[in-house]
Amino acid sequence: MNIKNVVVIGSGTMGSGIAAQLCNANIPVTLLDLKTEISEKAIKKIFESRPPLLIDKNKIKNIKAGNIEEDFEAVKNADWVVEAVVERIDIKHDLYEKILKKRKKDSIISSNTSTIPLKVLSSKMSNEDKKDFCITHFFNPVRYMGLLEIVSEPINDAKKINYLKNFCEESLGKGVIICKDTPGFLGNRVGVYAMQVAMTEAFKMKLSVEEADSIFGRPMGIPKTGVFGLYDLIGIDLMADVLKSFIKELPKTDEFHEVAKEIPLVKKLIETGYTGRKGKGGFYRINKTGTTKIMEAINLETGDYSPSKKIDVKSDKVDLNGLINRKDKYGEYAWSVISKIIKYASSLVPGITKEFNDIDEAMRLGFNWAKGPFEMLEEIGVKNFFDKVEDFKGNSFLENLSKTKNEDFYGERQKYTNIETLGKAKKAALSLDGNDSAKIYRFNDYNIVEFTTKANALDYDSMDALKKATDKPLIIINESMQFSAGVNLTYTMQFADKNDFKSIEKFIKYFQETCKHLKYSKYPVISAPSGLTLGGGFEVMVHSNFVASHTNIVVGLVETIVGLIPAGGGCKEMLARWLNTDEAKLDYNYAPLKVFDIIGYGKTATSPIEAEPMKYLRLDDKKIMNRNSLLEVSKKILIDNKDFKAPDELKFKLPGKAVRGEMDKILEKLYNDRVILDHGVEVGKELAHVLSGGDTTIDKILSEDDLFKLELDAFMRLIETQKTQDRIKHTLATGKPLIN
């Protein structure tokens, strides 16, 4: 079979997300709902969505709106029909009856349900129809969450299920795991349990919501929302419904029941409309007093709100052993939560999956965990775990492991896919090198550098690793969600607070030196970015010889937002790209003005399609839907460029004062319109000085080093101002820009 036409029935959040991702894959989609107006409204929301659901907004034409009465004939031509309607079995059964009467032979039918078992959904179907019916459980938001669970039964056509898996991997960019028909499948079964454990243990140990979230977050390799923040994000009432479903479906002997008991405070929150972010608040709320907004957190014992407190647990890196061995309540909480998650996840093997690795990948792809339960066990160490763990009777996985004490129990990662992923490659590396900020994985023919800091922020150690790894062809790629959010500003401000600007200048020079080294290295350098690729992260990428970009990239030079200008060659490289246009050959001012606009506003692109017109990416840079394929594509680039020669150094002819006058006029208008204030003008003038070439004239030739020097001098002048320091501190503290 071949999926060339899809019908999605139900245009709510999930149906719209699925339709949008099919649209991204250039697959024609008919989106049906009760009324065409509902579908049309959903398509409009897809087009306007933030963050964007579409990689290329021009592809919206791939989605056609309709209704289930007048336009149901579309099912006849569909190769795949996806049901994403309300979670009511009577409505679903009625819909399946209609679909099965109309569908073409051999088409696939699937449900996006997350709660209703496959055997219940298909209970009224013939055995012949059951062969073509399965669950395709996408995670929200569909474009950005990597996990897709396909739930099938032995009666299913195995070839068809395998085709669907491959299609969703290759065309939709999903990490597809085949699941057994068990409650919650893989991701939600373990993920919801983990949330409940984290919550019940916080209540039991009388931790505050902020304390619990500070531990059940980055220190454990879990998104920073923590458990209570995640509860608010999902919806406290929705979570209550999910728990009811698990309680109903799971056998009474399942350990899930221990953590799913109703909590009086949670019941009270729902009854009073405190259902999370969508309601009046939840465990956290925003208290508005006049023009002031104060984040408040609930007291788990009294139910009263008070201003939320930032908890510094002195644990910024993922270090599970360090965390569980702490001699305080945080260490006790961490061990209690982690050990229970490991015990529960391992009790599900082989009941819900024969490959325990699949559980880890479900947590990575569906919940953005850095490590799944079994990787946590691997990091803690088998002996250490059993030295600390208490009762695990009846858990065959742990009973067997306790006898063998096999520290190498994990084996191969990511067995669910045939793609040569980064996770698999790392396990097969000949040697491991690097430091606390970046790891170097060495192979016969190439090296891999992976950044390991928070948000993969760049520092001296990051640069050291990059330079050290260029003794062979180099691929810069990360398994975490981000490529790099830029230079470590916290690190920079530590020097600024001491008025040690010489150390900042030394670091920026080293950063420039490293970027130039990458560009002119003897061997090719490939960047394989995904997620945030901003500021210094962009400058590393743009100095690479080749780029293989994931479609879910956020790329740009955003330094002006914090009162700085790009100083790692970002200005230089953007000028070079815009100078190489036909327009720039006719007008000397064209390239500096274009780059001034892009960098000045801190413009970002949310896909390669958006990035190309800004020249953040080149037309020949590779674009990959499946993040897992970034390494394979990068290795193919190396094979295709065995005769690589480093590029010639760039030369620049820039107009100097002639274009700076135009830039000054732009800044004056922005100031008069109150778009920027005093310091915004100062930042803009420094940027203008760099992009115009400084004191040059059009008949002079500037080298790359000349541009590096202009960037450095402008950066240093700005970092020494109090207003830039205020911007940086405000952004670090709040995550929001300061206009001053």
Image (cartoon, rainbow, N blue to C red):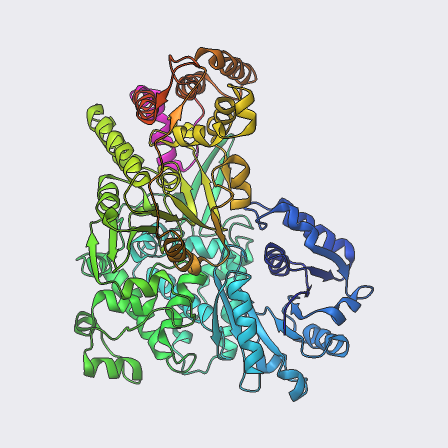
Give the residue at x 33% y 66%: 424
Q: Position of residue 211 (x, y in %)?
A: 31, 52
Q: Magenta part of the protein: which range?
A: 717-738
Q: Position of residue 117 (x, y in %)?
A: 56, 78
Say above or below: 600 vs 5. Answer: above
Residue 729 colored magenta? yes
Q: Please tell me which residue lies in front, 266 or 229.
A: 229
- Mostly what secondary structure, the magenta segment? helix
Q: Please tell me which residue lies in front, 232 or 616.
A: 616
Q: Quarter holding the N terminus?
A: bottom right
Q: Please tell me which residue lies in front, 617 or 370.
A: 617
Give the residue at x 51% y 19%: 589
Q: Position of residue 339 (x, y in %)?
A: 28, 69
Residue 295 appears in the picture as rendered: yes
Say above or below: 341 vs 539. Answer: below
Residue 196 appears in the picture as rendered: no
Q: How many marks can you see?
A: 0
Say above or below: 579 vs 194. Answer: above
Give the residue at x 32% y 20%: 722
Q: Please tell me which residue lies in front, 24 or 670.
A: 24
Q: Quarter holding the C terminus?
A: top left
